[in-house]
Image (cartoon, grey):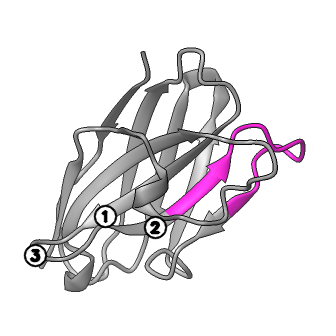
Amino acid sequence: HVQLVESGGGSVQAGGSLRLSCEYDLFNLGRSCLAWFRQAPEKEREGVASFDTGDPSGGRTYYGNSGKGRFTISRDNAKNSVYLQMNALQPEDTAMYYCAARKVVAGQTCAAVRASLYNYWGQGTQVTVS
């Protein structure tokens, strides 16, 4: 079955950086969207970034509003891992960060980084910025 395990969260001062990691096993899911989401207390889960594992170019990336500019999603195929580099962190970035996956259906892309589209979730890793 699909497994996603996040790590790398922690506490950091405003202006600092963190790199989150998600080790994944997509089992037999096939071509997939892998994404990062975040959820602050009493707020909805919001999309940060995603990419398409089957994109012929090597991994086209997409960003939600919360991820544009300061965050970068990347992948290491050899390690079955996806990363989220977060720079210039601000207190409003404080949230639980989740790794998620969904199968790419024919005709669709990974551009829509919406939680409702994703079927598989990790347990999350907490990021606190003060």
- Mark 2 or mark 3: name the one nearer the start of the chain: 3
- Seen in the image, is 18 located left or right of residue 54? left
Q: Residue furthest right?
A: 56
Quadrant where the C terminus sits is bottom left
Q: Is residue 63 left or right of residue 71?
A: right
Name the one closer to the observer, 100 or 103.
Answer: 103
Query: Circle 1 sits in a helix, a strand or a loop, which is it?
Result: strand
Q: Residue at x 42, y 73 (%)?
A: 87
According to the image, label 2 marks what residue? Answer: 48
In space, the residues marked 1 and 2 are separated at their CA atoms by 7 Å
- Give residue 19's position: percent from left, percent from top: 39, 54
Helix, strand or loop at disc 2? strand
Disc 1: which residue: 38
Quarter holding residue 116: bottom left
Q: Which mark, residue 5?
A: none
Asked if the stretch drawn in magenta spans residue 72, the answer is: no
Circle on res. 42: 3
Spatial CA distance of label 3 from label 1 is 12 Å
At a point 58% along the width and 71% down the height, the residue shown is: 63
Q: Amino acid at mark 3?
A: Glu
Q: Is residue 87 above or below residue 124?
A: below
Q: Disc 1 residue type? A: Arg
The answer for how far apart the CA atoms under marks 2 and 3 are is 18 Å
Q: Is 14 left or right of 20, judged from the image as shown?
A: left
Residue nearer the viewer, 63 or 79: 63
**What's the residue type where badge 2 is placed?**
Val
Task: Please name which of the two marks, 2 or 3, marks the residue nearer to the observer.
Answer: 3
* Label pair 3/1, CB-CB below 8 angstroms: no
Q: Position of residue 128 (x, y in %)?
A: 15, 67
Viewport quadrant of the N terminus: top left
